[in-house]
Amino acid sequence: MPQLDRLIVFPQIFWLLFFFTFIYAVLTHFFLPLFIKSLKSRKLIEEMNSLEIIILTNQFEKNRSSLKQLVIENLSLAENLLAQTFLSSSTGGENIKINQANLRLNSAITNFVLYNNYPLLKSICFYSKIRM
């Protein structure tokens, strides 16, 4: 077979290895440092972004906790004021004439405010004064 002759095969192998070695040397000498620089800069950008995300997350958690604390304090203050108002009006402390329906409504609202019980509030039937 003529294509496997030493005179034909060895020069082909030589030039094949020569060109692959040349291409490998060019790629590693010129292009590999550019790729490494790009990868290092991407890694640095990723680290900076992760630090910024951690800082923003910490600020968000601080703001959320302070807002939650403020809301809890104000809701407890409102609950105490409403409870005092409803309890004083239901015991007759203000000489107001209160009929039976208003007393039931007042006790339901008081229980809802104090215990935040939605089924208790749903237990009151509200009817309009005008019947059709």
Image (cartoon, rainbow, N blue to C red):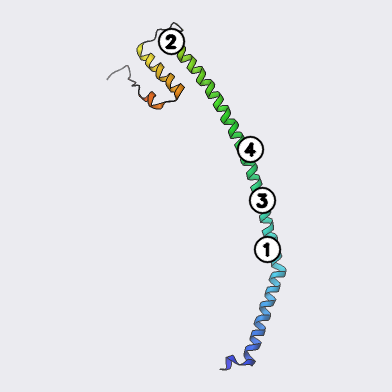
| Foreground pick, 120 / 125 | 120
* Among the two numbered marks 3 and 1 on one chain, the one whose residue lies closer to the N terminus: 1
Q: Residue at x 60, y 31 (%)?
A: 66
The mark found on residue 59 in the picture is: 4
Whether pointer 1 and pointer 4 mark residues with C-beta atoms closer than 8 Å, the reply is no
The quadrant in which the C terminus is found is top left
The mark found on residue 35 in the picture is: 1
* Among the two numbered marks 2 and 4 on one chain, the one whose residue lies closer to the N terminus: 4
Residue 77 vs 43, above or below: the answer is: above
* Among the two numbered marks 2 and 1 on one chain, the one whose residue lies closer to the N terminus: 1
* Among the two numbered marks 2 and 3 on one chain, the one whose residue lies closer to the N terminus: 3
Picture coordinates of residue 125 (x, y %)? 33, 21
Q: Residue at x 67, y 59 (%)?
A: 39
Picture coordinates of residue 62 (x, y %)? 62, 35
Q: Residue at x 45, y 14 (%)?
A: 87
Which residue is disc 2 drawn over? 91
Residue 29 as seen in the image, left or right of residue 87: right
Residue 74 as seen in the image, left or right of residue 50: left
Work out which residue is located at the far right of the displayed protein and give it. 29
Answer with the quarter of the image where residue 127 lies.
Answer: top left
Q: Nearer the viewer, mark 2 or mark 3?
A: 2
* Among the two numbered marks 4 and 3 on one chain, the one whose residue lies closer to the N terminus: 3
Residue 93 as seen in the image, left or right of residue 63: left
Q: Label 4: few (<14), some or many (≥20) within 10 Å?
A: few
Work out which residue is located at the far left of the displayed protein and give it. 132
* Distance from the alpha carbon under mark 3 to that under mark 1: 18 Å
Residue 48 vs 29, above or below: the answer is: above
* Distance from the alpha carbon under mark 2 to that under mark 4: 48 Å
Q: Label 3: few (<14), some or many (≥20) within 10 Å?
A: few
Amino acid type, mark 1: Phe
Which residue is disc 3 drawn over? 47
Q: Nearer the viewer, mark 3 or mark 1?
A: 3
